[in-house]
């Protein structure tokens, strides 16, 4: 996230953490979390963001190796 200059607030982290918990409750292992203009490929098992992409770089991007997606409002 540092490389892509993506900064998140504590409130952002709380919402993303809630999405991770929801995915874990459904048995997900690797999930795409869509939050605002961000796409976060996340290891639910390890509670780690693997890839973070902002809206400017998301065009024509293919997400692989995920078993779920969570859309956060």
Image: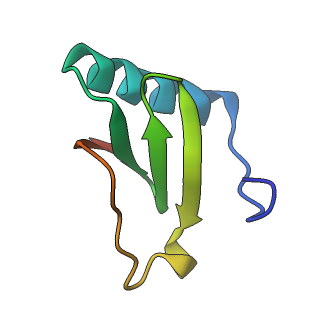
Given the current orientation, which residue lies at the most extreme top position?
25
Please determine whether, in this image, residue 22 is positioned above or below residue 59.
above
Viewer can see residue 45? yes
Given the current orientation, which residue lies at the most extreme bottom position?
60
Q: Which residue is drawn at 69% across and 37% down?
A: 9
Count of labels in the image? 0
Q: Residue at x 36, y 38 (%)?
A: 30
Q: Residue at x 54, y 24 (%)?
A: 14
Q: Residue at x 44, y 22 (%)?
A: 45
**Residue nearest the observer in this picture, 48 or 20:** 48
Where is residue 11 drawn, in percent x and y?
59, 29
The quadrant where residue 52 appears: bottom right
Where is residue 35 drawn, in percent x and y?
43, 49
**Residue nearest the observer in this picture, 11 or 26:** 26
Please determine whether, in this image, residue 23 is positioned above or below residue 68.
above
Viewer can see residue 73? no
Please determine whether, in this image, residue 11 is positioned above or below residue 52.
above
Q: Position of 60 compared to 23: left or right?
A: right
Where is residue 28 drawn, in percent x and y?
26, 28
Q: Position of 51 compared to 1: left or right?
A: left
Q: Position of 16 compared to 9: left or right?
A: left
Where is residue 69 drawn, in percent x and y?
26, 45
Given the current orientation, which residue lies at the most extreme left position?
26
Colour mode of the rendering: rainbow
User: Split into 4 quadrants, where in the image is the C terminus?
Assistant: top left
**Residue nearest the observer in this picture, 30 or 36:** 30
């Amino acid at each position: 996230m540092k490389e892509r200059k993506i900064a998140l607030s504590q409130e952002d982290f709380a919402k993303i953490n809630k999405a991770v918990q929801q995915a874990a409750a459904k048995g997900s292992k690797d999930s795409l979390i869509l939050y605002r203009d961000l796409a976060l490929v996340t290891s639910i098992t390890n509670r780690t963001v693997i890839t973070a992409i902002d809206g400017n770089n998301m065009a024509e991007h293919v997400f692989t190796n995920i078993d779920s997606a969570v859309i956060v409002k």
